[in-house]
Amino acid sequence: MDAAMHRRLTVAVCWAMSRRATLDGQERFEDSYALNEEFREWLLCLEDNPDLLDQSVLTVPLFPGVERRPESDGLLEI
């Protein structure tokens, strides 16, 4: 797995863990469980089909006349 892909996956996992902790803190256990199950299915699917990660990440469009910095991979990590 390349570095950009690893960063995106790390951000997604950290978001899910943070969201789950927030939901648990609010005693919204059903929502927490649903998030956990959906995220687990997504991660397991990525093991079998790593190309799906590229399809599930938003890409910033290229605008004419705007120069992109080389360290930026142009992806929005949500």
Image (spheres, rainbow, N blue to C red):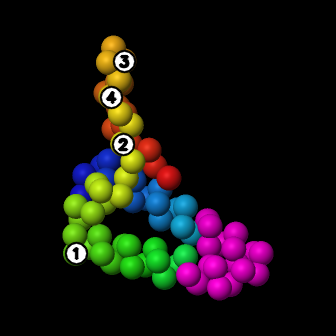
Report whether 55 appears left or right of 20: left
Q: CA distance from mark 1 to mark 2?
A: 23 Å
Task: Report which residue position mark 3 lands on.
Answer: 66
Residue at 36% x, 42% y is: 59
Task: Report which residue position mark 2 lands on.
Answer: 59
Where is residue 60? Give x, y as percent.
39, 37
| Amino acid found under the numbered disc labelled 4 | Leu
Q: Disc 4 or disc 1, which is closer to the eye?
A: 4
Residue at 69% x, 74% y is: 23
Report whether 57 appears left or right of 13: left
Q: CA distance from mark 3 to mark 1?
A: 37 Å
In the picture, the quarter occupied by the N terminus is bottom left
Q: Disc 1 or disc 2, which is closer to the eye?
A: 2
| Amino acid found under the numbered disc labelled 2 | Thr
Task: Report which residue position mark 4 lands on.
Answer: 62
Q: Earlier in the sequence, mark 3 or mark 2?
A: 2
Seen from the viewer's position, the closer of residues 61 and 32 is 61
Examine the rendered structure and indicate whether residue 17 appears above or below residue 66: below
